[in-house]
Image (cartoon, rainbow, N blue to C red):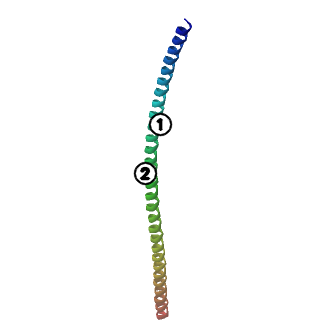
Amino acid sequence: ALCSDIRQKIVKLDKKEETIIGASSSCLAEARAEMRALQDELREVGKEDEGMVERFCEESERLSSDSIRLAKDLKDTEHEEKFLSYKIKELIGEETYQFEKRLEEDR
């Protein structure tokens, strides 16, 4: 009777152990699946980040080129403005000279 009782307890413990092992395996499989999903998600985020960094670099490069071009345009405009200012002064000087010349001739 005692042996039979012990055997039944052993069988029950074996069944509990199998249940626990089964549940553990199931939990472990779920955890692994979640981990793989998170790794996939992380890879996707990494790809998006790479794309964003690449776009940022391209945009920075474009803006830098635009800034250089605008600075050159500004410099060219300043040179043109100085040249036109010089020409205006030259014309005013010539007009003044012609005006003074006519005044002398009229006297």
Which residue type carries mark 1? Met
Separation of residues labelled 2 and 1 (CA atoms): 24 Å
Q: What crowding class fits label 2: few (fewer than 14 Cα within 10 Å), some (14-19), or many (20 or more)? A: few
The foreground one among 45 and 30 is 30
N-term mark: 2 or 1: 1
Give the SS element for disc 1: helix
Residue at the image position 45 percent from the left and 51 percent from the top: 50
Answer with the quarter of the image where residue 40 lies. top left
Q: Position of residue 99 (x, y in %)?
A: 47, 87
Q: Which of labels 2 and 1 is toward the front?
A: 1
Which residue type carries mark 2? Gly
Q: Position of residue 30 (x, y in %)?
A: 46, 30
The foreground one among 63 and 53 is 53
Residue at the image position 43 percent from the left and 51 percent from the top: 51
Residue 59 drawn above or below residue 44 = below
Answer with the quarter of the image where residue 41 lies. top left
Q: How many numbered marks have been drawn onto this rendered protein structure? A: 2
Answer with the quarter of the image where residue 6 lies. top right
The foreground one among 83 and 54 is 54
Q: Quadrant of the N terminus?
A: top right
Q: Are marks 2 and 1 in contact (CB under 8 Å)?
A: no
Q: Position of residue 104 (x, y in %)?
A: 49, 93
Q: Position of residue 32 (x, y in %)?
A: 46, 34
Q: Which residue is mark 2?
A: 51
Give the SS element for disc 2: helix
Q: Which residue is mark 1?
A: 35
Q: What crowding class fits label 1: few (fewer than 14 Cα within 10 Å), some (14-19), or many (20 or more)? A: few
Residue 72 drawn above or below residue 44 = below
Residue at the image position 47 percent from the left and 65 percent from the top: 67
The foreground one among 75 and 25 is 25
Residue most extreme to the top: 1
